[in-house]
Image: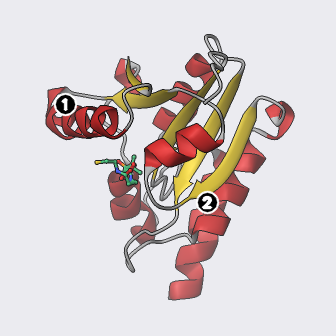
């Protein structure tokens, strides 16, 4: 494994990517040269966007920084993906104490699986602390305003998705 300390992996389902996720990527870029946004491939059947659609949308958001923000899907173990891209760091956003149990479990499991991989937690900005992909999916289908929750690129894609479903 290479000792690349300049890159980090930001994994998630990202169905869809929210303003909270954008903020974590932007703040991670203050610390790391490259951030690999790793989109989980094997989502449940209830996923709104396909993995490919999610990658495309996230790429569009970071179009101006495509050298620094690499967006890819991954399947299997996250630590294997981290190794594949020669990183050693997983970044996860924390919104509230309620996130902590699940996040601690994952971080400890990932360290069991590969002790060289470290998980770093980043507190969300307070204005993003209530935002989640689930919340977006509860509001958007009924035409609710999601402009404070997601980037306009995602808002447009949500609109298109839900108008097709009608
Ligand atoms: O956005 P999410 O759904 O909270 O992200 C969860 C994710 C993708 C980070 C997690 O499910 C994951 O890493 N899945 C891959 C399988 C794995 O390696 N699990 C970690 C050991 S628990």
Q: Are marks 1 and 2 in contact (CB under 8 Å)?
A: no
**Residue 38, image x, y percentages:** 57, 47
State left or right for residue 58 relative to residue 16.
right
Residue at coordinates 19% horizontally, 38% vertically from top-left?
Answer: 105
Distance from mark 1 CB to nearest ligand 1 atom below 8 Å: no
> Which of the 4 image quarters holds residue 29?
top right
Camera-side mark, 1 or 2: 1
The answer to whether residue 83 is above or below residue 57 is: above
Circle 1 — which element?
helix
**Nearest the eye: 71 or 3:** 3
Observer-nearest of 137 and 88: 88
Residue farthest to the bottom?
Answer: 166
Q: Provide the residue designation for mark 1.
A: 100
Q: Earlier in the sequence, mark 1 or mark 2?
A: 2
Q: Can residue 63 be seen here?
A: yes
Can you identify the residue that label 2 sits on?
A: 54
Residue 143's place in the image compared with 35, above or below, is below
Nearest the viewer among 46 and 88 is 88
- Within-10-Å neighbours for mark 1: few <14, some 14–19, many 20+: few
Q: Quadrant of residue 52?
A: bottom right
Residue 2: percent from the left, percent from the top? 65, 25
Residue most extreme to the top: 31
Q: Is mark 2 within 8 Å of ligand 1?
A: no
- Which residue is painted at 72% across and 40% down in the image? 70
Where's residue 111, x and y in %? 32, 31
Residue 123: in sight, yes or no? no
Residue 126, quarter of the rendered image: top left
Q: CA distance from mark 1 to mark 2?
A: 25 Å
Which element carries disc 2, helix, strand or loop? helix
């Amino acid at each position: 494994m290479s000792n690349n300390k300049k890159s980090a992996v930001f994994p998630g389902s990202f169905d869809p990517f929210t303003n909270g996720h954008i903020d974590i990527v932007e703040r991670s870029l203050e610390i790391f040269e490259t951030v690999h946004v790793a989109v989980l491939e094997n989502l449940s059947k209830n996923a709104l966007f396909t993995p490919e659609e999610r990658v495309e949308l996230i790429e569009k958001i970071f179009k101006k920084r495509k050298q620094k923000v690499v967006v890819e899907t991954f399947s299997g173990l996250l630590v294997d993906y981290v190794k594949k891209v020669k990183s050693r760091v997983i970044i996860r956003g924390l919104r509230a104490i309620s996130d902590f149990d699940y996040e601690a479990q994952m971080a400890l499991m990932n360290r069991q699986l590969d002790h060289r991989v470290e998980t770093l937690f980043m507190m969300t900005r307070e204005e993003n602390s209530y935002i989640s992909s689930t919340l977006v999916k509860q509001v958007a289908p009924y035409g609710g305003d999601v402009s404070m929750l997601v980037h306009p690129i995602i808002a447009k894609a949500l609109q298109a998705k839900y108008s097709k479903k009608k």
